Image (spheres, rainbow, N blue to C red):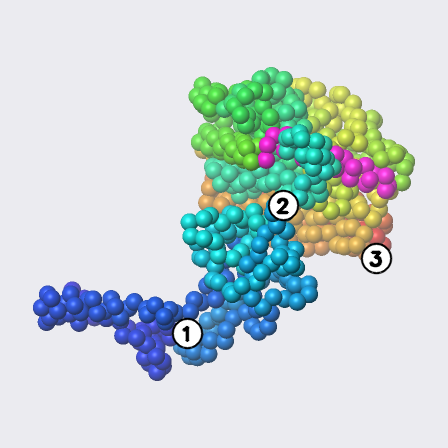
Amino acid sequence: MLRRRAVPRVPGTLSRRGRRREGLPHRQSPHPRHHAGLPPAGQRRRGQDLDRARRPHPRRRPRPDPVRRLRERLGRRHHQRLPAQGSLLPQDHRRRQNLAPHPSLRGHLLRLHRPVLVRLQVARHVGREPQRRARHSLPEDGNHDRRRLLDDPRSQPQARRPHPAQNRRQLRLAHPHRHRLKDLPPRTPPGQPLDPGLLVPRPRRSLQARAAQAAGTAQDPGAAASVKRPDPIELEFFRQLLVSIPEEMGVVLRKTAFSANIKERRDYSCAVYDAQARTIAMGDHMPVHLGAMPLSVEHVLRQFDLRPGDVAVVNDPFAGGTHLPDITAVAGVFPDQSRPAAFYVAARAHHSDVGGMSPGSMPLAREIYQEGLRLPPILLVREGKLDDGLMRLILANVRTPDEREGDLLAQWMAMERGAARLTEAVARYGLPRLNANVTALADYAQRRMTAALKSLPAGCYRFEDSLDEGVTIRASITISDGRATVDFSGTDPQVAGPVNANYAVTLSAVFYVFRCLLDGDVPANAGLLRPITVVAPAGSVVNANPPAAMAAGNVETSQRITDVLLGALSTAAPQLIPAASQGTMNNLSFGGDGFAWYETIAGGMGAAQNCDGQSAVHTHMTNSWNTPIEAFEHSHPVRVRAYHVRRGSGGAGRHRGGDGIVREIEFLAPADVTILADRRVRPPYGLDGGQPGALGRTLLRTGGKSRVLAGKIRLDVQPGDLLRIETPGGGGFGLE
């Protein structure tokens, strides 16, 4: 039994006690105890009286709240007729008076949300505006032009009649985007449906459609879309539609994945391809993934004739992959369940462990067989059914099988979402129309790239840079007549170490650098690479042959390729090219009893001609996010002792380079640690007289003593050991 009831000392103004306390008008709500002591018949009569009292009088209906009405209509695509003079909202003095005591009682002001004007249409009559709504006699030829009805001499104005609500609602539902209150027709006889065609003008048709109608022939809308000149508005609509599909695939992948590497760092990429494996659209994900994924799709199509429900996976760097932790899933899209596929979708994700000689699968290997499980194109899902045997084989060769299974299934779900969205687009707009806009977008991207290359001075531009091990990458870029040839001849041959890159990684770096030359929002598709030719000698460090190790080629060599290409273009377009950024991903991987971890650490961005470089950001070929300390410490036996900006590490100049990061990690359990980092010997270069950024540094404190580690090293740590990573800063631009 409730013996004590707590009542707030200062009740709310809008409550019954609060209104009574402030002397505001209020209405006593009837309570069931008022019926006590009455006979049953009296209780019934009292209940009927109360119901009748609650019911508003038919002639005194409460005026609807205009704010509420406008809120309900926000998002509806019909027009609201507003008065030409006066405020949009009536000045309700009583409502404001009732809310006046609110600040003194609650400590804050209860704001009245005013309507937001999302669309305004102004209409005026030419000539004299009729004072009454007119009933018009329509012409017999069927040409019902509402713009001429007001001036039609056959229009006979009569007394104004109210329009039936049912006809008003029918008009709104039939044409919500054309509805205007001022265009409502006169009252129609009861039972006769309203013809919205009398009010809504017919949509504009193309010249081809009009000519076909005049000739008495029908025309397929999809075929007309492929013949007529692309409409800019329609082109932008389809561009956004196509880009939204890989973006949504990425959201599904991130929200259903198990590992923090995908959920938190977002080390994944999604894209859509046409029937020839050419890129249609890609999400705003990892540049090193996106430029290389088309080669993985091509290798899958060479191996399999995908059927509805099939999902293939591949991570082999010599079959379009980048390095073994990056597993790519590919599936076909069959809108009408017929073969071959009309489109393909792909999702690539970095798995924190795929076996190999070191936890995290980023070892200091000499050949690819030491790096982990190597998957050629193989079907993980066959006609919608998971291959349990293949899944068991993969999970038996990794250190964290539960995470790997969850991440692979998440990639499968991303495939399902991408295929569903493309199927909906085909069902709504038709395959011919969709393909026509895909082709137009690729042609537009090609024209934009050609125009950008034509704006650069013709010539041959050269540059070279080296990794800390002394491996040199040389490139020459020849620009002429809207085309570019990127030649890596003279680059050092492949080495017995993990810094080798394949052709897919090199092509990805070229795609990224030349895409950065474009201003504005240009579609990222296969059309961008049409004016560009890439020459990468086989057997070199930028196009290695098997069985070369590839772990660091995707993360470190790709950054150096980017620095070389930007350095070459800095002579042709100094106003566009910044100084070198940190030039490394500072890869940290470790593992122990039942856990494995991989992350990249941000650094400084190079300064540009008109701005300083940003600090503590991921740059160029990596686009991953920061690893939250809470997620890091929750899932692994570590403690983050420091995480802050490395002040003063950016290169000096008229515009300073961005600063790097300091990250200190204390290990709480024994672990096997591997570090793959660069710019510990050769700093990021400056431009136009700017100073280089500070070198990176890695230290290990054991038993109170610290020692400097090499940029690429493997070591064992014990509980209490402290690892400190100082990332490089960006180069400066211009003389101070």
Query: Is there CB contact under 8 Å for labels 2 and 1?
Result: no
* Local crowd size for mark 1, using a 10 Å CA cut-off: few (<14), some (14–19), many (≥20): few
Identify the residue at image location x=80%, y=28%.
Answer: 533
Q: Where is residue 160 in the image (x, y as percent from the top left)?
A: 51, 64
694, 491: nearer the viewer: 491
Does residue 35 appear left or right of residue 219 in this picture?
A: left
Q: Magenta span: helix, strand or loop, mainly?
A: helix
**Residue at the bottom extreme of this rendering:** 23
User: Which region is colored magenta?
Assistant: 429-456
Q: Where is residue 84 in the image (x, y as percent from the top left)?
A: 60, 69
Q: What residue type is labelled 2?
A: Asp
Q: Earlier in the sequence, mark 1 or mark 3?
A: 1
733, 288: nearer the viewer: 288
Q: Where is residue 2 in the image (x, y as percent from the top left)?
A: 18, 66
Identify the residue at image location x=43%, y=75%.
Answer: 95
Q: What residue type is labelled 1?
A: Arg
718, 569: nearer the viewer: 569
Q: Where is residue 82 in the image (x, y as percent from the top left)?
A: 56, 66
**Which residue has dot 2 on it?**
141
Quadrant of the rendering where the N terminus is positioned: bottom left
Q: How many labels were placed on the picture? A: 3
Identify the residue at image location x=52%, y=57%.
Answer: 186
Q: Earlier in the sequence, mark 2 or mark 1?
A: 1
Which one is in front in this view, the residue at disc 1 or the one at disc 3? Answer: 1
Secondary structure category for the residue under label 1: helix
Quadrant of the rendering where the C terminus is positioned: bottom right
**Which residue has dot 3 on it?**
736
Tell me the quarter of the picture where residue 464 sits: top right
| Residue 42 in view here | yes
**Which residue has dot 1 on it?**
106
Secondary structure category for the residue under label 3: loop
Tell me the quarter of the picture where residue 584 sits: top right
